[in-house]
Image: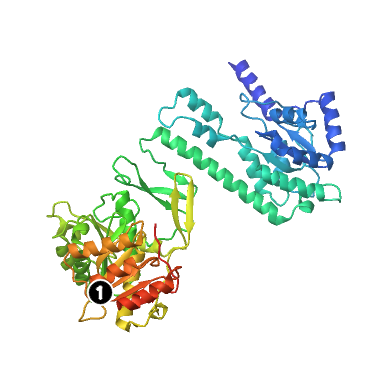
């Protein structure tokens, strides 16, 4: 036993205090050659060596030593470019069945080390030379993942995909990007070409990064690296998460978004959907809980949230008590009044058939009296700034009560700088929001029949309603004769492929509800191209119309409106298309 313990102790001491091994003759020759020939090095590890040939040639002409992984070394040799195998430079070959090639102190130290001092030495006495250019193309994990079947992935496929999770390449790029003032980090072929051109054009000799490349370019390249590596990690995380979870949606959509709420379903019951919350610059109202946004804790559906957002957007822009009702992405009632109860009644009566099962939003707290009023209607969701205490108990005895959604979080989003829409999984459209607020001064008279100020206020409200519907859209609005501040939609036509169809739908719905259209006004989200829309509106009793104006036939439209006795106004070209 004592002999065994003594042997173990001797072994540990030998491990902790390794003897300095003498260098082999060929290693000494390589070291002298490296030190003599090159004042700096570049590291190449490429999936496609041809994408960096120009850069490799430019660096080589400037006396830069090209270190290359095994595959890159062989491919460069085929094009007549001499490189130094990484294994020769580090003194060890690939290990872990080829998974570890470049993770060596002589490589990482050369990338991360400070410049200007004498090279540090490895324990065996070899110097750590600066590596000023890191040109690495990580394994194409995303392309490999896309090539696999989404449904039944075999164990062989999973093993192959696992091998495409890059460790060394990502590490090298991140190290280079961290030390960007001294190291140029490259992975995209077009950036390789850009840097190659700069190096070739520099006639001063040598190509130290700080001298050849300006800091703005180096920062840009470093930023690209961290965005690339973050995206790479996100895709791997998505794949691993979906492999082990029954949830068909990833827990993290990208490096800045977390899944906050799994929705009941998507646009249709067979579709999965979730609400994701961005982490970057995320500062919502403190009373919003993404995991349980409704008072009851029941999860809304994908369509519920889309409609709730649109309804909330319609009311938060108004100062007076306002109610909006949305169904399948379109407005079916909008009204403002002296109190929120009256606004709800007017909005519901605008198109009671469409309002059945709709989404309601109000811009005043939902009081006990309003809750009792809501109980008499079948509604899917009600959004409000807040709800009276005991709101759930009030609704408890109603069959299929609506979801009650406090909307501060939605209102916060409506005030954002951008709006995004998706084109499939990977493409996003981004635009600034349509937040133009027209005033009475923006409503320009276009013909001899001038509207009065009260009519202009009603036209403004009508144009707001038209802007909340999908194009082509026309809104017909009636003002309460006893109060200039009470307005309500009475006919809404939306989502039509021609302007006259939108007019006809609005008139049809108004007549179906039994609304009297005499003296009402109308608004169009786009200009009237022909006289037919004005003819239909005038025949129904509409006395004033507002549209953006500016069409090719504008002069004829103005003259025709005058002949019909309609006050025609323009928003000065401000259009309100919505898709």
- Say which quadrant the N terminus sits in: top right
Query: Relative to residue 71, is residue 306 depicted above or below?
Result: below
Q: Nearer the viewer, residue 354 or 257?
A: 354
* SS label for mark 1: loop
Indicate the quadrant where residue 30 lies. Answer: top right
Within-10-Å neighbours for mark 1: few <14, some 14–19, many 20+:
many
Indicate the quadrant where residue 536 lies. Answer: bottom left
**Number of numbered labels in the structure image:** 1
Please provide percent x and percent y for residue 301. 29, 49
Q: Describe residue 396's horizontal placement relative to residue 488 as left or right.
A: left
Give the residue number, with chain letter if any, for mark 1: 520
Please provide percent x and percent y for residue 325. 26, 62
Q: Nearer the viewer, residue 444 or 82?
A: 444
Q: Residue at point 71% right, 55% down?
A: 215
- Say which quadrant the C terminus sits in: bottom left
Residue 388 is at least partly visible in this image? no
Please provide percent x and percent y for residue 484. 26, 80
Query: Relative to residue 358, is residue 264 depicted above or below?
Result: above
């Amino acid at each position: 036993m004592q002999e065994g313990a003594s042997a173990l102790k001797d072994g540990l001491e030998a491990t902790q205090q390794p003897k300095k091994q003498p260098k082999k003759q060929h290693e000494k020759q390589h070291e002298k050659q490296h030190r003599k020939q090159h004042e700096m090095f570049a590291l190449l590890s490429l999936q496609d060596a041809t994408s960096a040939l120009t850069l490799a040639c430019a660096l080589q002409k400037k006396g830069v030593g090209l270190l290359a992984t095994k595959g890159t070394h062989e491919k460069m040799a085929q094009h007549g470019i001499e490189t130094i195998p990484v294994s020769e430079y580090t003194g060890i070959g690939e290990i872990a069945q080829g998974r570890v090639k470049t993770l060596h102190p002589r490589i990482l130290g050369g990338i991360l080390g400070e410049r200007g001092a004498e090279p540090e030495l490895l324990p065996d006495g070899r110097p750590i030379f600066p590596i000023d250019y890191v040109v690495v193309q990580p394994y194409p994990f995303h392309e490999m993942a896309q090539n696999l079947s989404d449904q039944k992935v075999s164990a062989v496929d999973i093993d192959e995909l696992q091998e495409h999770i890059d460790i060394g390449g990502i590490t090298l790029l991140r190290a280079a990007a961290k030390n960007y003032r001294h190291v140029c980090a490259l992975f995209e072929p077009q950036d390789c070409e850009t840097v190659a051109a700069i190096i070739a054009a520099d006639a001063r000799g040598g190509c130290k990064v700080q001298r050849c490349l300006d800091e703005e370019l180096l920062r840009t390249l470093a930023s690209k690296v961290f965005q690339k590596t973050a995206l790479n990690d996100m895709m791997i995380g998505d794949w691993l998460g979906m492999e082990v979870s029954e949830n068909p949606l990833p827990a993290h959509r990208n490096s800045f978004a977390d899944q906050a709420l799994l929705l009941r379903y998507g646009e249709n019951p067979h579709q999965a959907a979730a609400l994701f919350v961005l982490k970057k610059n995320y500062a919502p109202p403190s009373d919003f809980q993404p995991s349980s946004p409704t008072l009851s804790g029941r999860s809304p559906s994908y369509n519920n949230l889309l409609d709730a957002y649109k309804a909330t957007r319609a009311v938060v822009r108004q100062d007076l008590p306002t109610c909006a009702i949305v169904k399948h992405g379109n407005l079916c009632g909008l009204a403002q009044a002296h109190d929120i109860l009256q606004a709800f009644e007017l909005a519901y009566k605008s198109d009671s058939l469409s309002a059945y099962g709709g989404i309601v939003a109000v811009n005043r707290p939902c009081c006990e009296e309003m809750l009792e009023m809501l109980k008499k209607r079948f509604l899917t969701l009600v959004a409000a700034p807040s709800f009276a205490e005991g709101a759930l108990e009030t609704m408890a005895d109603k069959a299929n009560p609506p979801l009650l959604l406090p909307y501060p979080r939605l209102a916060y989003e409506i005030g954002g700088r951008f709006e995004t829409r998706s084109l499939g999984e990977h493409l996003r459209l981004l635009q600034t929001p349509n937040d133009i607020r027209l005033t009475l001064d923006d409503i320009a008279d276009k013909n001899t029949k001038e509207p009065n100020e009260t009519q202009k206020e009603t036209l403004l409200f009508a144009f707001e309603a038209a802007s909340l519907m999908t194009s082509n859209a026309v809104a017909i609005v009636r003002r309460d004769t006893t109060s200039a501040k009470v307005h309500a939609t009475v006919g809404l036509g939306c989502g039509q492929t021609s302007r006259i169809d939108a007019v006809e739908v609005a008139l049809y719905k108004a007549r179906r509800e039994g609304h009297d259209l005499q003296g009402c006004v109308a608004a169009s989200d786009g200009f009237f191209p022909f006289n037919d829309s004005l003819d239909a509106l005038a025949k129904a009793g509409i006395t004033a119309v507002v549209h953006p104006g500016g069409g090719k036939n504008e002069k004829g439209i103005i003259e025709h409106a005058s002949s019909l006795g309609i006050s025609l106004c323009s928003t000065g070209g401000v259009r309100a298309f919505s898709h």
